[in-house]
Image: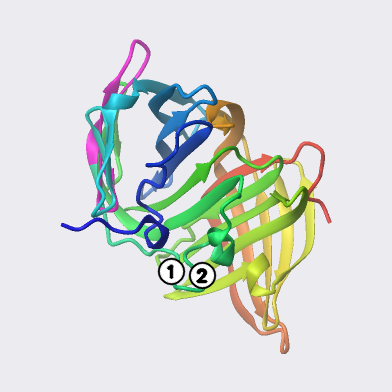
Amino acid sequence: MPSLTPLWHPALFQGRRATRGYFEGWYFKVVDAAGAEPLAIIPGVSIEPDGRRHAFVQLIRADGRAHWFDLPWRAFSSAEDRFELRIGACLFSDREIVMDIEDETASFRGRLALGAPVPWPVSALSPGVMGPFRYAPFMECYHGVLSLDHSVAGVLDADGEKLSYDGGRGYTEKDWGRSFPSAWVWVQSNDFGRTGVSLTASVARIPWLGSSFVGFIVGLLLDGRLYRFATYTGARLVSLEHVAGGATFVLEDRRFRLEVRASGAVPGVLRSPVLGQMIGEVEESLRGTASVRLTERATGREIFDGVGRTSGIELMDPQGDLAI
């Protein structure tokens, strides 16, 4: 089959021409039906500043236990005509995850079937979640939301413990570029007690032409409609306040007001990229909650009010650079 153009298909491997100082990682979050065993699986690749290359798979569980598997570059391959990548004996695509990996301290095996993805829309003016910023060739980090919500089924064996994800839900995103931002807050949940609701929210300090600005990308999927609040849509970040184990922020555009309160974060530690090298650290929790309220500005009419469980939360703003 003919190759697809990576610009219009953010799920595809974007780094075929990268030679040094580059990373790319796909983030698969799966939550079981009871909400007891949320799990994030992150396959990826790293090209260090000196050109050394390797692949990896890292995971983090509900209790914060994280594990890193380092593999040689030759263990990585990716299709050019569809979203499918392999790292060692593991396979990752938009419709399944196959885990078959172990080292001296941990092992993960099994297969998860993923339902039809609900990606962030792609168009000529807005090729994905970054909007027109996707066209900028000098961004430090690019972001893609590959599925806001989908079903999950299957069983994983995690160090001999059977984890069933039958009747579960999943979410998939990715990042690629040189480094993560210097400061960010990220909140995600699609566990609102019913299907059809998903929140993804990111506020970050973005380097730009020798300076920087606070940018944001927030999407609330509600029964097939995606409410988008982003720097490039003309929305405004009204406030952002850090609280113990969480953050509260408010966004508005011409028609709507979105209030998000993330709380209960008890993080574990994942590795993150610094100039392509996976030597940074990210504190991530999978057991937080996200209270979300969407209203119509003109009338005050409430469109949605709910609480997302098993929320992914990252609070990486130690200096308070994002607070408003």
Q: In which quadrant is the C terminus drawn?
A: bottom right
Q: Depth check: give the residue in front, 275 or 223.
A: 275
Residue visible at 63% across and 73% down in the picture:
233
Residue that badge 2 annotates: 126
Q: Confirm whether the magenta stretch covers residue 101.
A: yes
Amino acid type assigned to the residue bearing label 2 in the image: Ser
Q: Amino acid at mark 1?
A: Val
Q: Secondary structure at mark 2?
A: loop
One can see residue 216 in this view: yes
Residue 119's spot in the image, x, y percent? 40, 63
Q: Nearer the viewer, residue 295 or 5?
A: 5
Relative to 179, say whether 33 is above or below: below
Per the picture, the main secondary structure of the magenta-coloured stretch is strand
How many callouts does the rendering have?
Answer: 2
Residue 302 drawn at (x, y percent): 64, 80
Report if residue 36 is visible in the image.
no
* Of 133 and 267, the residue lying toward us: 133
The colour scheme of the drawn protein is rainbow
Q: Is residue 24 above or below residue 304?
A: above
Give the residue at the far bottom of this rendering.
Answer: 299
Residue annotated with mark 1: 122
